[in-house]
Image (cartoon, grey):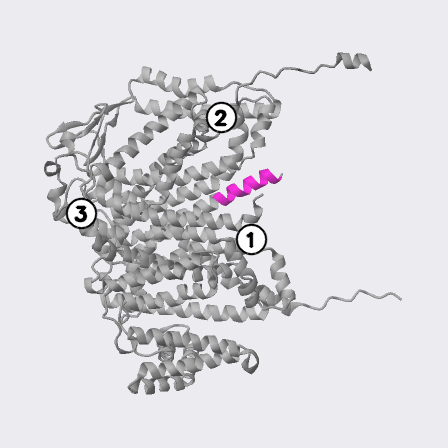
Amino acid sequence: MSDIASNSFVRQDLLTERPAPVKTTGFVGLMRTRLFNSPTNILLTIVGALLLWFTIVPSVRFLMVDAVWSGKDRTACLAENAGFAVGACWPYIQAKLPQLIYGFYPEAERWRVNLTFVLAVVLLVPMLVPRLPAKGLNASLFFVAFPVVAFFLLHGGGIKGFGLSWTADLLQLFDESIVNAGQALLNLSKTSALGPLLWVVGKLVVLVGTAIAWLIFPLTWLRDELQGSGQSVWTDFAVTSLVVSLIAFVLGGGLRTGWRALGSSLATFVAIAVVIKLMGLDHGGLPVVATNLWGGLLVTLVVSVTGIVTSLPIGIALALGRRSTIPLIRIFSIAFIEFWRGVPLITVLFFATYMLPLFLPGNFTVDGLVRALIGIALFTGAYQAENVRGGLAAIPRGQGEAAAALGLSWWKTTSLIVLPQGLRHVIPNLVNSFISLFKDTSLVSIVALFDLLGSLRASFSDPKWSTPSTAFTGFAFAGIIYFIFCFGMSRYSIFVEHRLNAHRRN
Amino acid sequence: MSTEARKPPPQIALKIRRILGGKAGWNGVAVQFAFAAILGWIGYEIVSNARANLENQHIAAGFGFLRNNAGFDVNQTLISYTGSDTFLRVFVVGLLNTLVVSVVGIVFATLIGFIVALCRLSPNWLLSRVGEIYVEIIRNLPLLFQILFWYLAVLAALPNPRQSISLFGIAFVSNRGLVVPSPIGQSGLEPFLAVLALGIVAALALRFYARRALFQEGRMIRIWPTVLALLFGLPLAAMLVFGLPFTFELPQLKGFNFAGGSRIIPEFVALTLALSTYTAAFIAEIVRAGILSVHSGQMEAGASLGLSRGTTLRLIVVPQAMRVIVPPLTNQYLNLTKNSSLAVAIGYPDLVSVFAGTSLSQTGQAIEIIAMTMGIYLLISLLTSAIMSVYGWRVSRSLGA
């Protein structure tokens, strides 16, 4: 025992202090570990610093230090008048700002554009914040109600009838087309070798057309009666709301459970009536502003929002079609998607501008903006279809099988079980598509629409403001606007992705 | 008493149902008939409307116009072309211009993209930030915006040819484009090319032989000195024997413009710059994601086997990363080719610009011209996706086996 104790050693004095470990946090730590830790890294740091020095310093000088901030015309932005090498010519942007935002939209009516922007922001912001409630109502307002209201706000004009008249018109058009096709076949049968067969088919088609004409006769008769009466919009509105509410009531479960559907349908119609009354749609509405007067940021936003709103349903329909078990629908969806994805957007716009009018009846003229919108909707729809398909494929089979075991139909399985989960999976991809759609809207300037970029380009040719720095100033301004929108969307997409993957983080 | 197995009931009806309607059965058949009827009706409407409209506008349908004289000039042609050539030749000229700008753009985009990806992956904090800033700025601005920026702002701000910026006295940059020396073939050209081709073939054969020796017999053969000799020595020797293959004609400033040399039009410069820098940002992200997708354990395993860092990268990390990189990379190449159609905005004579633009407005044959243009792009993208699916099949086979 004792020798163990004698051998034991207890240190009596303190160890000398060791130097503190090298700091690896904070600015100094960053410099030590990631900037100057080896000769190569020092060299790379110098290269990086030089790159930044030669890009950021001239940009800041151009945008801020050397910029001219006030003036009436180009003389203020010339080096000999300013007395120094002039950078950005901001008075030029100031003078052109209305054109860059509204295009040639009449000055007295610009409040309508502003109101539309405000409405869009008010509807969009609550939809983007995940914590806020009533997403369904909000989404339906933004995706269905807002585009209609925005159309009547921006374009102006009123309505002549309502749902009933429109349905009657549409059905009548369809019926006429069928009868015409039958007549064409009958005419063809006189010359063709397949005469009798064509004759039979033609007669059959004409017969079907006549039958449809008799079927829809009550509807067309009612329309003619309504149009004859003085208050065509309101009577038509009343009849339509009555019919639709009744259908909703019956489909919703009749006396047992249909009250809820009836209530929401009536509430919707009351809201529509308020909108019609407020905007005076029943007697002409707001003065019409033709779309060739629209321009600037307005067109950019109209095209991108319309593209977003219309491409999503197209995409969902195509994605479901591509997964369908029915051969013809699957083949059609695949061909449709691959076709639009295989061609550049600019040829799609050329197609919509030059080819589409040829495919429509001669008395049917489509506005230039609408043509571009159709092209963009088809093009983006095909891309969205692939995104949505990715989301649908990510849903385990068991979900659909469980729904089938509960006795849900295909429609209910899809709309209640598969789609909500699948779409949630791909929100980041959808937002990324919207970013590229937003960037691609600049292409409409090639088919003679003046979006932000088109208006910018048009403003360069104004001799009143032609200085050496005009082009750079204009591009700087438009670039900042585009960057803010796209960068904002991409940050939002990252935020949603982070939120969706919250359960995977540890 | 033995019970014989009952014959299965004849399932002819079931089979017919399956063929006609797929899994959905008779419902599927009905849906298909309705869908076909709707498609047929739409098709009929399109054809009859188009026929009526064309008749009203006095335009003869058909591809006969391709043999008519175009009657306009194109400012960049790879094959000889004059205004008296046919529209078919315009089509070929435009297609070649599209392909040229795409190929050049792809080369530069790949180069810049890999450099930016390396920057982003570098351990140096500052350099990775620089790469990130580049990617964020370029990706969040529309491509058309960038094309117009290079064309209308940067290139237009360059001086005129008389004050052009000289690059070592060989090439000159001005607002009329880039003037570079043009090679002029001499008598030694043909033997030079023949020897060069021979050298390339021999080098490839040598590599093939060396790889077989390595994989089948385990023999390492050092081939790079021989390959260098084949690729550079042989052509040099040919040059000594047969004389110079070509000489360069230097551009000279004569009056207000350059004489001699070949001029690259500013539209081409602007388009290539914009396309390659834009696509490079996307390629950088793809390459970065691909390299990050290789597990870090692979690098460590390579080190524990005693391989150097470079060898580990070359033999272990890059081949695995390539598997992830190649499909989206091809997609970006395809996007670049499709995006080259934006040339129409600045007047570079690509397919869309000269064919779907000028030819369309001259002839009014909208349906045929746009169908041909779309068809070419569709063909390119379908071919690429076919090649990619073969590649994917090979990769999955090599992984699965």
SS majority, magenta = helix
Give the magenta range: B388-400
Q: Quadrant of the C terminus of chain A?
A: top right
Q: Are marks 3 and 2 on the same chain?
A: yes
Amino acid at pointer 3: Tyr
Pinpoint the chain carrying mark 3: A
Q: In front: B301, or A256?
A: A256
Check residue A184 for magenta coloring: no
Mark 3 or mark 2: name the one nearer the start of the chain. 2
Q: Quadrant of the N terminus of chain A?
A: top right
Mark 1 or mark 2: name the one nearer the start of the chain. 2
Quarter residue A303 falls in: bottom left
Secondary element type, mark 1: loop
Pinpoint the chain carrying mark 1: A
CA gap, disc 3 and disc 2:
51 Å
Amino acid at pointer 2: Lys
Q: In front: A483, or B152?
A: A483
* Residue at image mark 1: A394
- Residue plotted at (55% across, 82% down): A255
- Residue plotted at (50% across, 70% down): B33
Q: Is residue A334 left or right of residue A395?
A: left
Look at discs 1 and 2 and give the one toward the viewer.
Answer: 2
| Residue A7 in picture, x, y percent from top left | 76, 12
A383, above or below B93, in the image: below
Amino acid at pointer 1: Ala
Q: Which mark is residue A92?
A: 3
Secondary element type, mark 3: helix
Q: In front: B290, or A174?
A: B290
* Residue at image mark 2: A23
A479, above or below B51, in the image: above
Pinpoint the chain carrying mark 2: A
